[in-house]
Amino acid sequence: MTVVAIDGPAGVGKSTVARRVAAQLAVPYLDTGSMYRAVAWQALEEGLDPADGKAMGRLIARLRFELRTRNDEAEVVVDGEIPGVRLRSPRVDVATSRVAVHPAVRSWLVAKQREFAAREGAVVEGRDIGTVVFPDTPHKFYLDAPLEVRAERRLRQLAGRECGDRGRLLSEMRARDERDIGRSASPLKRDETYKLIDTSTGDAEQVADRILRSVRAAATGS
Ligand code: DC
């Protein structure tokens, strides 16, 4: 069973790359960020503070949370509702990085991620996939690019939707990076077991091809 871990900071192009790799390997794609986002979104819907660990603990204890596979992608269903693109607003971005610091929320979601990938393998993207969720997979990739490049990419994604100005997006992204890297529970980091790929040059297809070559080479032992 193949599990490919793709980690890296926000806006680095992980989703496009991970989707392509999953399609080529014919395994489902799991975006773990959308799971953290769904908890944050639900917290905001209920007027709860995402930074309040106790409140988040109570929230997950009563939340019906499912991962449904649709078109070979895991889709998050919360209390019977599919939040979909509502998970992608800058407001949810900020709330999610606050929700993601709580160890109880993390271990609850990590169990679901392992269960999902155990069925038929998966390409899994996130921040701690190769370090915590699947530390034993031989296929670990860390995508990286400078903050300015990532902010431009995020601005293009947000075009036509709820979109703040460039300066605000940059500072929010910097703050999110700091929270993701600096938190004590499963921080974003890479070690020597990862292959580092700079995504500031080259398109998603080239990055995906590089990952596929590496995964296939490992499988054939070459
Ligand atoms: O990848 P993303 O932008 O959708 O992630 C949203 C937030 O969730 C981000 O602040 C980091 C956090 N996250 C995490 O802590 N661990 C993961 N495995 C995935 C996302």
Image (cartoon, rainbow, N blue to C red):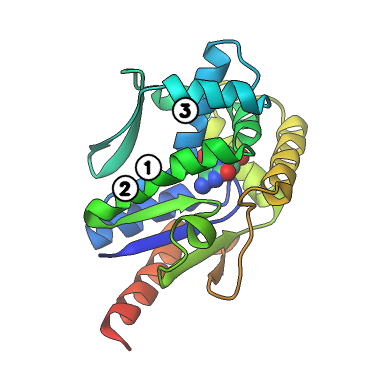
Disc 3 residue type? Ala
Q: Are marks 1 and 2 in contact (CB under 8 Å)?
A: yes
- Between 212 and 186, the residue placed more toward the observer is 186
- Judged left or right of residue 188, residue 46 is left
How far apart are the alpha carbons under marks 1 and 2? Answer: 5 Å
On the image, numbered disc 1 is attached to which residue? 112
The total of numbered circles placed on residues is 3
Residue 20, placed above or below residue 91: below
Instruction: Give the structural element (helix, strand or loop) at label 1.
Output: helix
On the image, numbered disc 2 is attached to which residue? 115
Disc 1 residue type? Lys
Q: Which residue is located at x 47 percent, y 64 percent?
A: 135
Residue 88, placed above or below residue 126: above
From the Cβ of disc 2, is ligand 1 less than 8 Å away?
A: no
On the image, numbered disc 3 is attached to which residue? 38
Residue 121: quarter of image: bottom left
The answer to whether residue 168 of the structure is visible from this angle is yes
Q: Quadrant of ligand 1?
A: top right
